Every structure is written in structure tokens, then in C-alpha cells.
Amino acid sequence: MSARRIVLFGPPGAGKGTQAERLVARLGVPQISTGDMLRAAVAAGSELGRRAQAVMDRGELVSDDVVIGVAEERLMQEDARRGFVLDGFPRTLAQAEALDGILDRLATPIEICLVLAIGAEDLVARLLKRAGIEGRSDDNEETIRKRLRVYREQTEPLVAYYRARSLLREVDGAGSMDEVEKRIGEALS
Ligand code: AP5
């Protein structure tokens, strides 16, 4: 039986959101995307949204305490007991350690961590293409490159963190969405 408590991470534009949607449709568990939750807070004009917007527009990370609080509240909901696909969380070592603590308390530990690997120029091209379609405020070339730097500096160390726990599976994120979905299916089987 496939894992149902999954962390999906990778650089901006790697396809986390795209593949998380496909995975949750197959597994019947919720997708938990801190990026989507923060954008919803911005759209709603809430206090959280006001604080997060400028940070997101600069391509930096929203503070650990804020994001951990948002993720914890979501993970405590009943539907997450069946499992979850975490999309874009955790993103720092502090977030990964906090996540382990939350899931220990819930007795629902991570079963597998998938990292989508793909070259920087492909990522920039994907996100500039999306900029022309969706107009996300952090999809301009300067901010995209900043997001990539932030990923390398703050999030990539999680590869070693999850590898040390024997939870890591690297998946080639290049190629079509269907090809990547197939590789993820193989990594989970
Ligand atoms: P977040 O929303 O998580 O954005 P991101 O990591 O920059 O990732 P993207 O959504 O840009 O890309 P993705 O990997 O999901 O790829 P997607 O499937 O969309 O975070 C945004 C911001 O919120 C952060 O910068 C930070 O400020 C804040 N934040 C969020 N979480 C946080 C946390 N935990 N801690 C602190 N701050 C946090 O695909 C991208 C595009 O490519 C799409 O147009 C898609 O259609 C296309 N595409 C996907 N797959 C393929 C394919 N195989 N071939 C061709 N095109 C493809």
C-alpha cells in the first residue's frame, strides 16, 4: 500500500503544486500547501496576509513561527488523520523539526519525503511562462532568482535531514507532467 503521509518539496517551479494535486486525487488525502494558505490570507486581507504579502513579494520566507502555526492548525484538522501531502512545508530545518514534533504528538509520522529535482533554467522558464498566464506577484525574473537562492540556502539542507532518516526519494522533475507523475508513482510503490 502506498504511503499516505508525504512531504513533497523542491525548488520554486519544480511542480510541487501540480504533482500534489494529482497525488491527493489518487490517495484521497488533503493537500496542505503553505503557499496556497498564505496567498488565501493575502486575498482575504487578514492580518496574517498583510504581514506575509511583502515578504512573499520579495521572494523571501515568511517567518518560521508564523508558518509553523499555520501548518499545525491545518494538520490538527480531522481530515489530516487519514494522511496528507505537504506541499512547500517544511522549508527550513526549524520547520522540519517543528513538524516532527507536531506529528509525534499526533502519532502520524512522515512516511516518505519526495524531492523534485530540476535545473534552474527550466524552473525560470516555467515560472516566466506562468507569469504571462496567472500574473502571480512573485513570478518576475528578479524575484524568481531570489526564490531559487533562498531555496538553495534554506531549504536544500532538508535533503540531508530526510536522507539521514532514510525517508528521502529523489524524483527527476524534468519532462512532462505525466512523466513526473509516473516517476512519483514508482517512488511511492
Ligand atoms: P509556494 O507557493 O510554495 O511557491 P514556490 O515554492 O515558489 O513554488 P511554486 O508554486 O512557484 O512552484 P511549484 O513547485 O508548486 O510548481 P507548480 O506545480 O506550481 O510559496 C510562495 C511563497 O510563500 C514563498 O516564496 C514564501 O514567501 C511563502 N511560503 C510558502 N511556504 C512557506 C514556508 N513553508 N515557509 C516560509 N515561507 C513560505 O508549477 C509551476 C509552473 O510550471 C506551473 O505553471 C505549472 O503548470 C508548470 N509545470 C508544472 N510541472 C510541469 C512540467 N512537468 N512541465 C511543464 N510545466 C510544468
Image (spheres, rainbow, N blue to C red):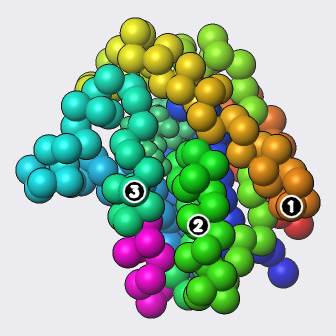
Q: In this view of the protein, which residue sits in the foreground, 140 or 156?
A: 156
Q: Which residue is under mark 2?
A: 99
Whether residue 32 sits left or right of residue 82 in the image: it is left
Going by the numbered disc 3, the residue's amino acid type is Asp
Predominant secondary structure, magenta span? helix
Q: What secondary structure is found at the residue carrying circle 2?
A: helix
Q: Would you say residue 137 is visible in this rendering?
A: yes
Q: In this view of the protein, which residue sits in the foreground, 75 or 128?
A: 75
Q: Which residue is under mark 1?
A: 165
Q: What secondary structure is found at the residue carrying circle 1?
A: loop
Q: Earlier in the sequence, mark 2 or mark 3?
A: 3
| Whole-percent x, y for residue 163 in the image | 86, 51
Density class for disc 1 (Cα within 10 Å; few <14, some 14-19, many ≥20) is few
Q: How far, Cα to Cα, is label 1 from label 2?
A: 14 Å
Is residue 60 magenta-colored?
A: no
Going by the numbered disc 1, the residue's amino acid type is Arg
Q: How far, Cα to Cα, is label 1 from label 3?
A: 24 Å
Q: What secondary structure is found at the residue carrying circle 3?
A: helix
Going by the numbered disc 2, the residue's amino acid type is Leu
Density class for disc 3 (Cα within 10 Å; few <14, some 14-19, many ≥20) is few
Up/down of 57 relative to 187, above or below: above
Q: In this view of the protein, which residue sits in the foreground, 185 or 67?
A: 67
Q: Which residue is under mark 3?
A: 65
- Magenta-drawn segment: 71-79
* Number of the label disc, if any, that sits on residue 182: none
Whether residue 143 sits left or right of residue 106 in the image: it is left
Question: Residue farthest to the left?
Answer: 45
